[in-house]
Image (cartoon, rainbow, N blue to C red):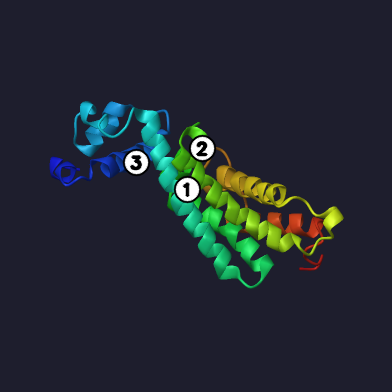
Amino acid sequence: MSKRGYHHGNLRQALIDSVLGLIEAKGPTGFTLSEAAKQAGVTPAAVYRHFDGRDQMIAEAARQGYEIFGQQIQRAYDSGQPSALAAFEATGRAYLAFARQYPGHYIAMFESGVAINCSPELATVALRARAVLEQAASDLSQHIPPEKRPPPSMFSAHIWALSHGVVELFARNSPGMTSPFPPEDLLETGIGVYLRGLGLIPEDV
């Protein structure tokens, strides 16, 4: 990014774009504030006009990631309606798609060590995204008798954990980890096993 971009008020986003590229290349702890400034075409001193330091830049990258993630999860949920099962499965696939399409954001969100409550803005968008997953779980679990029904937050957390595990082990080229099955198939069958255990889909589906 040239100084021209800065004069047009784009420095803040230019710095975040630089951070995202560095996160992808070096990991969330593998770069310095000076490197991010250099990538954006400004001096390190200019960074402090917008951010307190590297962690705040990573937190903003995470916030933007949750914003995108929430929108994609919402679209996936809406696309599966009116079937509660289709909507639920779509949110799982959207998680995998997001991790592949936005690796820098994904790492900032889940692997940087930045807490979602480090700022009200980050906490708000993170909770909004999770609320979509909980709504999908709540819709589907209405078919379970109340006395056997898991809380929607637990239900969605199980699927989130399953999705995250598939992404980390098999969808992001983890060293030494290979699978004879595509990540999409692993996720779909894993969700199927979970839902069968709750009696939400027939054994022969």
**Disc 2 to disc 3, C-alpha distance:** 21 Å
Q: Earlier in the sequence, mark 2 or mark 3?
A: 3
Numbered circle sitting on residue 143: none
Amino acid type at circle 1 is Tyr
Please report the residue visible at 32 percent of the width from the left and 32 percent of the height from the top.
51
Based on the displayed image, in which of its 4 quarters is residue 146 positioned?
bottom right
Q: Earlier in the sequence, mark 1 or mark 3?
A: 3
CB under 8 Å between discs 1 and 2: yes
Q: Position of 156 compared to 53: left or right?
A: right
CB under 8 Å between discs 2 and 3: no
Q: Residues within 10 Å of mark 3 (few under 14, many from 20)?
A: some
Q: Is residue 199 above or below residue 58?
A: below
Q: Earlier in the sequence, mark 1 or mark 2?
A: 1
| Residue annotated with mark 2 | 116
**Disc 1 to disc 3, C-alpha distance:** 17 Å
Residue lying at the far front in this picture: please name it.
120
Please report the residue visible at 29 percent of the width from the left and 44 percent of the height from the top.
13
Q: Helix or strand or loop: what does disc 1 sit on?
A: helix
Q: Is residue 45 above or below residue 8?
A: above
| Residue annotated with mark 1 | 66
Q: Position of 3 compared to 182: left or right?
A: left
| Residue annotated with mark 3 | 21
Observer-side mark, 1 or 3, equals 1
Q: Pinpoint residue 139: horizontal percent, then vertical percent.
A: 69, 63
Q: Pinpoint residue 6: horizontal percent, then vertical percent.
A: 18, 42
Q: Is residue 181 visible?
A: no
Q: Helix or strand or loop: what does disc 2 sit on?
A: helix
Q: Pinpoint residue 84: horizontal percent, then vertical percent.
A: 67, 67
Amino acid type at circle 2 is Ile
